[in-house]
Image: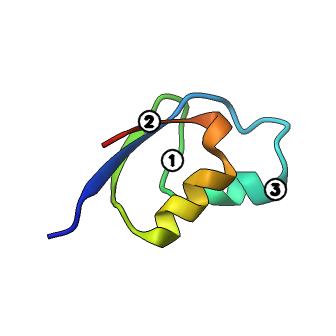
Amino acid sequence: MSEKIKITLVKSTIGKAKKHRDIVAGLGLTKLNKTVELADTPEVRGMIAKISHMLNIAQ
């Protein structure tokens, strides 16, 4: 079983670029302060890197 990573949206997507809003939706984050647990894959890490300023990340 692969490692899991917890991601929490801490900044609003209002006024952000459409690309950033799409990444947030792709990670499954729908509301502010929502936390999701995803597999720690290179694809997820790449998405996190693009919007790291809007997230809190825990292992």
Query: Can see residue 49?
Result: yes
Quick one: 25 or 7, which is closer to the camera?
7
- Name the residue tied to disc 2: 34
Image marks 2 and 1: residues in contact by CB distance under 8 Å: yes
Q: Residues within 10 Å of mark 2 (few under 14, many from 20)?
A: few
**In screen coordinates, is 1 left or right of 23?**
left
Spot occupied by residue 34 in the image (x, y as percentages of width and height): 44, 35
Which residue type does callout 1 highlight?
Answer: Leu
Q: In this rendering, would 4 be left or right of 42?
A: left
Q: Looking at the picture, how far across and down is residue 10, in whole percent?
A: 56, 28
Q: Secondary structure at mark 3?
A: helix
For label 1, the residue is 29
CA separation, marks 3 and 1? 15 Å
Q: Which mark is residue 18?
A: 3
**Residue type marked 2:** Lys
Mark 1 secondary-structure assignment: loop
Q: Is residue 48 left or right of residue 11?
A: left
- The residue positioned 51% from the left and 47% from the top of the image is 29
Mark before the other along the chain sequence, 3 or 2? 3
At label 1, counting other C-alpha atoms closer than 10 Å, the crowd grade (few under 14, some 14-19, many 20 or more) is: some
Q: Disc 3 versus disc 2: distance between alpha carbons?
A: 20 Å
